[in-house]
Image: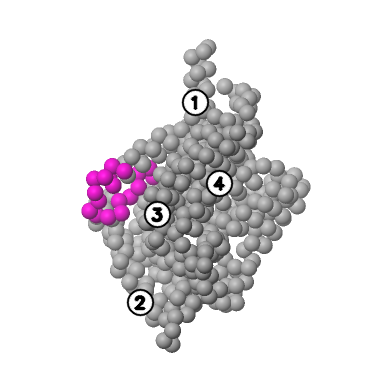
Amino acid sequence: MDDHHQAEPQRRISWRQIAVLLVLATVVRGVGVATSWDRFEDDPDGYRQLARNLLQHGTFGYPVQRDGRIQAVPTAYRPPVYPMLLAALGASGDVDTLSVAILHGLLGVATVLFVAILAFRSFGGPVAWIAALLVLFDPILLNQSGLVMTETLAALLAIVAWCLLSGSSRLGPRFGAGLVMGIAALCRPVFIVWLALVATVLLASSIKRRDVLPVLGFCFAAALVLAPWIVRNVLQFQRPIVTTTHGGYTVWLGNNDEYYDFLRTTPRGSVWDSTRLDQRYARKFLALDEDEVAVDRWANQQARDCIRRQPGMFVRASMGRVVRLWGWVPNRLSADESNLRRYARWAVGVWYFVQWIFLLAAIVMLRRKLLASPWIWAMLLAVSLTAVHSVYWTDMRMRAPMIPMLAVAAAWGFVRILDRTVGRIRS
């Protein structure tokens, strides 16, 4: 089937189709958050605590005991958008489980709808429905939607940005894309790399067309969003922190002598325990008078020193991180894994193995079209994720922002293969 025939399918999603998809997505994601109710009580990355301090003290920070009383001490250890969203939906000065569950349910449903809208607009109905279902039932997104973490929001911001970038190249959509990508960078720092790559490509293409106003609007919108956070950090920490002070720990977590020895001496698939590294980091934090900027620089330096001492192990560790990022089967989380959890991990592996077959088929069929819109924007995000997480600690959940794009590509590949197969049979 040639490209002219590929353009035949319906390109606009109807209100009836939206309603059907909305009901389906609401039921599935509603069940998902309901079964995760107990997990919403946990706060693995401290986002709920940040939201509570915003509500109760008006400070983006963590509680610290000083001079015999608890104070909310400002921080830049975590990005601000997700805690601010939690605080905005919090009730009576608190961030209760119900508000978190509702937020994650809405974010998940919105992600599915935006995937359908983009795929309908670009590729037609069959691709849209398959992509929407892949996102709706995606194991990573389903799992992360039940945790107080940023992946659910990041996936939505990524697909919204992709929709805007893939539409008109006029000022309005470009300005909107800049706003959304600026917000995304304050949700997950890896988006700042994507933003920079997109701006570079937009600038290059606008110079060719001699129309730089849209890309200037894109850059201005992104700067407009990022500026308050940067200014706040200059005032608070005397340093223009664009993302967070968490990067030093994350790069050290994946590049230290203990972890490199673990890779050298243990069988593949073993579970590394970072407890001693975490304790060392905590002791250094206290020794530096709880100066998170100083401890961030110290951790960065520890990682750089380790990489210089063992460049070969850095390459090996980096290759392992890329494999984990794009792998099919989730890593074990504990050495004494139950049979049920092992079977669940392998079931997830089968899901992604089948999806990647059609994803790779799409890549082969698209070839040079991968460097044109809309695929170029997805490719740039893939490059950003791979580059960042080849150095920083990673696992499968780190690719959550990319999952909607991967689903669209896999759906496109499946439909193209099906169309070609049916065409051969008919002929």
Q: Secondary structure at mark 1?
A: helix
Which residues are drawn in magenta? 325-344
What residue do we see at 42% from left, 52% from top? 146
Q: Which amino acid, mark 3?
A: Trp
Report, in whole angstroms, how far the alpha carbon at label 1 lies from the one at label 3: 40 Å
| Image point (31%, 43%), residue name | 344
Q: Give me the disc on residue 37.
A: 3
Reply yes or no: does residue 1 show up in magenta. no
Crowd class of label 1 (few under 14; some 14 to 19; many from 20; radius 10 Å): some
Q: Is residue 383 visible?
A: no
* Lower sequence index among marks 3 and 2: 3
Check residue 417 in the rendering and tell me which mark sits there, or answer none.
Answer: 1
Given this view, does label 3 or label 4 mark the residue nearer the observer?
Answer: 3
Q: For this view, does 174 lie left or right of residue 281?
A: right
Identify which amino acid the numbered label 4 is placed on: Ala
> Alpha carbon of mark 3 to alpha carbon of mark 4: how far?
20 Å
The answer to which quarter of the image holds residue 262 is bottom left
Q: Which residue is mark 2?
A: 283
The tag on residue 330 is none
Q: Residues within 10 Å of mark 2 (few under 14, many from 20)?
A: few
Compared to residue 178, the image places residue 4 above or below, namely above
- Residue 282 relative to residue 151: left or right: left
Q: Mark 4 vs mark 1: which is more N-terminal? A: 4
**425 left or right, relative to 260:** right
**C-alpha span from label 4 to label 1:** 29 Å
Which mark is nearer the camera, 4 or 2? 4
